Image: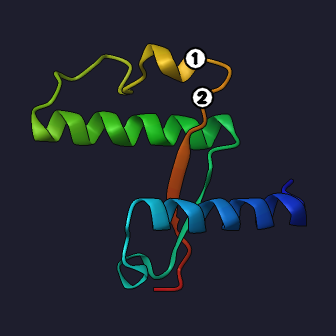
Amino acid sequence: MTDNRDTERNRRLGDILRRRMRIDPAQVKGMTFKIAETDEEKDAAFRLVHDVYVQKGYMDPDPSGRRVVLHHKFPGTTLFICRDSGGG
């Protein structure tokens, strides 16, 4: 379960990401940026990247249905995700 400190931390990180990526807030209205904290969140991100890479022709389909590379295994790697929070 996420406590209030984690929620606030994720909100601040989302603000930082949007500024660094120069994302117009109007383009991401109703979206929540956060660190992937669960195996389910990470798996969903890897599956989404796989599907988009295959669709765009960047890679052939992998039997796992996931796009995972070596750096995802490094202890210091952080995976950021974006979700529709229903506010848009």
Q: Residue 11: where, in percent of width, then height? A: 68, 67
Determine whether, in the image, residue 44 is placed left or right of residue 27: right
* Residue at screen point 62% across, 39% down: 40
Q: Is residue 5 above or below residue 62?
A: below
For the residue pair 26 and 55, the one nearer the viewer reads as: 26
Instruction: Give the quarter of the figure containing the C terminus.
Output: bottom left
Q: Residue 9: where, in percent of width, then height? A: 76, 60
Q: Residue 82: where, in percent of width, then height? A: 50, 59
* Residue at screen point 12% across, 40% down: 56
Determine whether, in the image, residue 41 is placed left or right of residue 51: right
Q: Are marks 1 and 2 in contact (CB under 8 Å)?
A: yes
Which numbered disc covers residue 73?
Answer: 1
Outermost residue on the left side: it is 57
* Residue at screen point 37% across, 67% down: 22
For the residue pair 64 and 1, the one nearer the viewer reads as: 1
Instruction: Say what secondary structure mark 1 lies in.
Output: helix
Q: How is the image coloured?
A: rainbow
> Residue 24 lies in what quarter of the image?
bottom left
For the residue pair 1 and 9, the one nearer the viewer reads as: 9
Determine whether, in the image, residue 38 is placed left or right of residue 16: right
> Residue 49 lies in what quarter of the image?
top left
Q: Is residue 33 above or below residue 62?
A: below
Q: Which residue is mark 2?
A: 77
Crowding near pointer 1: few (<14 within 10 Å), some, many (20+)? few
Q: Residue 53: where, in percent of width, then height? A: 22, 36
Instruction: Say what secondary structure mark 2 lies in.
Output: loop
> Residue 67 lies in what quarter of the image?
top left
Q: Is residue 22 above or below residue 88?
A: above
Crowding near pointer 2: few (<14 within 10 Å), some, many (20+)? few
Q: Amino acid at mark 2?
A: Thr
Q: Amino acid at mark 1?
A: Lys
